[in-house]
Amino acid sequence: MEEKNTSYIFVTVAGSTPQIITESLYDLIIQQKKKIGAIHIITTLHGERRCEEMIKAYPDGQFYKFCTAYELNPMDMPIHIHVITDENGHKLEDIRDKKENESAANFIDGVIQDLCARDDVTVLASLSGGRKTMSAYMAYAMQMYGRRRDRLFHVLVSPPELEFNREFFFPPVSGDTVTINTASGSRQIKTDDIAITNAEIPFVRLNDFLDFDNNLNVNLSYTDKVGLTQKSLDSVYKTELDFSDMENGNLTVIWQNNIRWTIHMKRAEITLYKYIYDIKEMHNSTEFNPRHVEALNRIYKGAREGIDSYPDYSKQGIVDFRSKINKAIRDRIGNKYIEDYITIESIQQKPYPIYVFGKASGQTS
């Protein structure tokens, strides 16, 4: 729901085809009747030159032509061009490699975070311009910082010949036809056949859930924030494991503090499961580790009667244990996401098998 006491700001990523700026403004201002208070363009040095030449140049830039045609005051919509910089503050000519992509991600993330932190504005973000990676980073940034009133959209231009045509910037106010040059020659398109459509993109708003405005998180990189986001989402499926009735082969799984499942296993199975649970934070290694020896001694002493039904703790024996343990968990829980955090996973088979507890060994007690 959009708040009445805020003004609209339009933000977009742009590259070699800045037409998307005036096309989007036509949709927002002329078709949707929104009053835009500022325009923010995120681009590279190459894109900045294109915007300066084709959009921002006075009086022949297409932005000023658009304002003149539709009787708008360009001073009411100041244009801010944000040129992507690397970690040293150097402006990027283009985005061509992994390092430059990382810089673009961090830069776009920062701009969107700053805009969405303003209580006096509603952010209208377009994904239509720039490189695909730039659009993807903007979409993810809107998920992290976008509020309920902020919007994410893409504009569609038809007929198709106009969508990437360098001569078309916005529908004319008057005139029966528009003449454009195409690869096959000059072509006239009826004004009535021109349509610019706003395709709003629903997105999950994580801002309140993640609290990225917290001072502790301000200086994190985009990649760090993605990791923090995943960790926060993973915590939804965090479980507690109660081994208090382990003597009777019973494991209690507690989710969200109030939902409980009791899973019964053979004594040897639950003892091995508890062992892997206890060492989940230890690094796997071929080197001697006294902690493993101590734990294995406890298994042997505490579960001797259960082990009799298995040949030994050989490779095949462990595989059998793991299969039976995981089956008992999956048969009882019935929720794949929770199960993934408490089953025993194999992350390596050769040259020797390595087993970890839970999804990516990330379960915490």
Image (tube, rainbow, N blue to C red):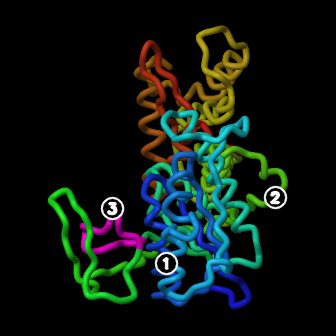
Is the residue 226 above or below the residue 33 in the image? Answer: above
Is the residue 63 above or below the residue 340 in the image? Answer: below
Does residue 38 show up?
yes
Give the x, y percent position of residue 357.
Answer: 58, 36
Q: Disc 3 vs disc 1: which is toward the camera?
A: 1
Q: Answer yes or no: do the residues labelled 2 and 3 have beta carbons within 8 Å?
A: no
* Residue in the picture at 67% in, 19% down: 292
In magenta stretch: residue 353: no
Real-space CA distance between mark 2 and mark 3, rounded to the nearest whole angstrom: 41 Å
How many marks the image carries: the answer is 3
Q: Which numbered disc covers residue 214?
A: 2
Real-space CA distance between mark 3 and mark 1, rounded to the nearest whole angstrom: 18 Å
Q: Disc 2 vs disc 3: which is toward the camera?
A: 3
Is the residue 220 above or below the residue 212 in the image? Answer: above
Query: What residue is disc 1 on?
Result: 66
* Residue in the picture at 61% in, 75% down: 150
- Magenta range is 155-169
Give the x, y percent position of residue 184.
Answer: 15, 59
Q: Earlier in the sequence, mark 2 or mark 3?
A: 3
* Residue in the picture at 24% in, 67% down: 161
Secondary element at tag 3: loop
Q: Quadrant of the N terminus?
A: bottom right
Q: Nearer the viewer, residue 304 or 348?
A: 348
Q: Nearer the viewer, residue 189 or 224?
A: 189
Give the x, y percent position of residue 249.
Answer: 58, 43
Give the x, y percent position of residue 40.
Answer: 63, 65
Q: Quadrant of the C terminus?
A: top right
Secondary element at tag 2: loop
What type is the residue that disc 3 sits on? Phe
Q: Residue furthest left?
A: 184
What type is the residue that disc 2 sits on? Asn
